[in-house]
Image: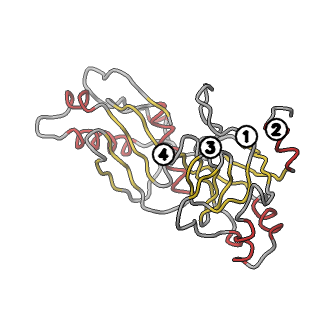
């Protein structure tokens, strides 16, 4: 998540970008709708799609470098991007016959018409240790039995793929990643349970890590000793949208050593 606070230019216009700075690319169909009185969402559909998410992340990075007038922050999700804005600043700039939402929407459409560069994300490649013991991964057996494989296979399959961070949400630093192999996919629990920070879970084709002690309904297969969120760090969250994550298995002794800062 990135925040922006800035002054409007004299004409309350989006800054134009010269044609040699951008690459015009088509976007999949989308809708723009208001979210309360100070935000709007650009929605590309309720889907998990690597290509669409790449475009959402590209749009997020474009707005990071060239924020819209009155814009405060942009938040990417799986297949949508929400733009929060200063209602009062935008209200000063809109035409008399426009609503604030219509004026902000006009800016978004102008930006899309002018074009922006869509490129493969240059996120970080992260390796995250996970202890998959039964103590830390109480739901491995459930997933294994449901899919007709051994518990060891669940670990092997989970650590065999690099997962993309589609978005952060739910809790600070909670990264929604995908997609896990169908052989280890499993529905979330009907009721949430209290979970420890670092718990690694699966829900459908998604995998994620709980950054804090909290209720959660995902199937828990292990725990990482790494800290996913620290409010004292300049970089608050270990992971960001667009990053790539490769899990690897560690023993409980290794878990304790890393947790204690001995390695």
Q: Tell me the SS state at disc 3.
A: loop
Gap between marks 3 and 2 measured at Cα = 16 Å
Whether 169 is drawn above or below 52: the answer is: above
* Residue pointed to by mark 4: 76
**Farthest residue in the left direction?**
97
| Marks 1 and 4 close (CB-CB < 8 Å) | no
Q: Which residue is mark 1?
A: 226
- Label 1 with label 3: CB-CB less than 8 Å: no
CA separation, marks 1 and 3?
9 Å
Give the crowd class for mark 4: few <14, some 14-19, many >=20 residues within 10 Å. Answer: many
For disc 2, the marked residue is: 258
- Disc 2 versus disc 4: distance between alpha carbons? 32 Å
Local secondary structure at mark 4: strand
Horizontal arrangement in the rendering, residue 91 relative to residue 122 (left or right)? left
Q: CA distance from mark 1 to mark 4?
A: 24 Å
Mark 1 and mark 2 lie on one chain; the one further toward the N terminus is 1
Q: Residue 199: horizontal and vertical position, in percent? A: 68, 51
Which residue is located at x 20 percent, y 31 percent? 91
The answer to whether the residues at label 1 and label 2 have Cβ atoms under 8 Å apart is yes
Q: Earlier in the sequence, mark 1 or mark 4?
A: 4
Residue at the spot 64% in from the left edge and 62% down from the top edge: 219
The residue nearer to you, when weighing 6 against 9, is 6
- How far is the residue under mark 1 from the one under mark 2? 8 Å
**N-term mark: 3 or 2:** 3
- Nearest to the eye among marks 1 and 4: give it: 1
Above or below: residue 3 compared with residue 45: above
At which x and y percent is residue 198?
A: 68, 46
């Amino acid at each position: 998540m990135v925040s922006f606070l800035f002054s409007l230019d004299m004409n309350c216009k989006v800054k134009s970008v010269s044609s040699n700075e951008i690459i015009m690319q088509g976007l999949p169909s989308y809708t723009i709708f208001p979210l309360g009185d100070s935000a709007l969402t650009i929605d590309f559909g309720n889907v998990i799609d690597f290509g669409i998410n790449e475009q959402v992340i590209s749009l997020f990075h474009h707005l990071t470098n060239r924020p819209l007038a009155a814009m405060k922050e942009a938040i990417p999700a799986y297949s949508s991007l929400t733009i929060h804005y200063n209602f009062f600043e935008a209200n000063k700039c809109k035409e008399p016959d426009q609503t604030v939402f219509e004026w902000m929407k006009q800016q978004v459409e102008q930006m899309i018409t002018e074009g922006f560069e869509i490129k493969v994300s240059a996120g970080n490649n992260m390796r995250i240790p996970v202890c998959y013991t039964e103590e830390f991964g109480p739901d491995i057996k459930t997933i294994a039995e449901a899919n007709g494989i051994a518990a060891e296979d669940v670990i092997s399959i989970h650590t065999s793929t690099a997962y993309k961070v589609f978005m952060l949400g739910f809790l600070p630093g909670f990264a929604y990643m995908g997609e896990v192999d169908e052989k280890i996919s499993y529905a979330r629990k009907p009721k949430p349970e209290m979970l420890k920070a670092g718990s690694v879970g699966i829900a459908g084709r998604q995998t994620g890590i709980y950054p804090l002690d909290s209720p959660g309904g995902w199937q828990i297969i292990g725990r990482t000793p790494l800290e996913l969120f620290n409010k004292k760090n300049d970089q608050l969250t270990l992971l960001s949208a667009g990053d790539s994550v490769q899990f690897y298995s560690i023993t409980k002794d290794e878990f304790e050593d890393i947790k204690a800062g001995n390695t």
